[in-house]
Image (tube, grey):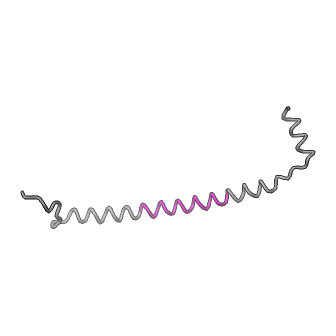
Amino acid sequence: MSDDAIVSIISRLGVDYSQAIMSTRQLASETAMLDKQLKMMKVAAASVGRASGAGLATQLMGDKVIYDQNYAG
C-alpha cells in the first residue's frame, strides 16, 4: 500500500491526533523540568566536592596530620 493511499484512508477516518499532541507536549514539559533539576543537582554536587576537597587539602597541609599510626621510623 502506498503512502498516499494510507494518508487518504486516515484522512477519511478522521483520526484525532489531539491526545498524542497533548501527551507529547506534556512529555516535553516534564523532560525540561527534569533537565533543570539535574542541572541543579550537578551544581550542588560540584559544590560539595569542592568543599570536601578543600577540607581534605587543609587537613593534609597541616603540620599535625598523622599519616600512619603504625610507622616505626
Q: Main secondary structure of the magenta part?
A: helix
Rendered view: 10 above or below 46: above
Relative to 58, 34 lies left or right? right
Question: Nearest the camera: 49 or 15?
Answer: 15
Q: Position of residue 20 (x, y in %)?
A: 77, 54
Total tally of numbered discs in the picture: 0
Q: Position of residue 71 (x, y in %)?
A: 11, 58
Question: Nearest the camera: 39 or 34?
Answer: 34
Relative to 64, 37 lies left or right? right
Asked if the magenta segment contains residue 35, the reply would be yes
Which of the 4 quarters of the picture holds residue 3? top right
> Could you tell me which quadrant the C terminus lies in?
bottom left
* Residue at figure coordinates x 25%, y 65% from the top left: 58
* Residue at figure coordinates x 18%, y 65% from the top left: 65
Which of the 4 quarters of the picture holds residue 36? bottom right
Relative to 17, 39 lies left or right? left
Rendered view: 9 above or below 42: above
* Residue at figure coordinates x 29%, y 66% from the top left: 55
Q: Residue furthest front?
A: 70
* Residue at figure coordinates x 52%, y 60% from the top left: 39
Q: Residue furthest top?
A: 1
Q: Which residues are magenta?
A: 28-46
Q: Residue furthest right?
A: 12
Asked if the magenta segment contains residue 50, the reply would be no
Q: Position of residue 59 (x, y in %)?
A: 23, 65
Q: Position of residue 22 (x, y in %)?
A: 76, 58
> Could you tell me which quadrant the N terminus lies in?
top right
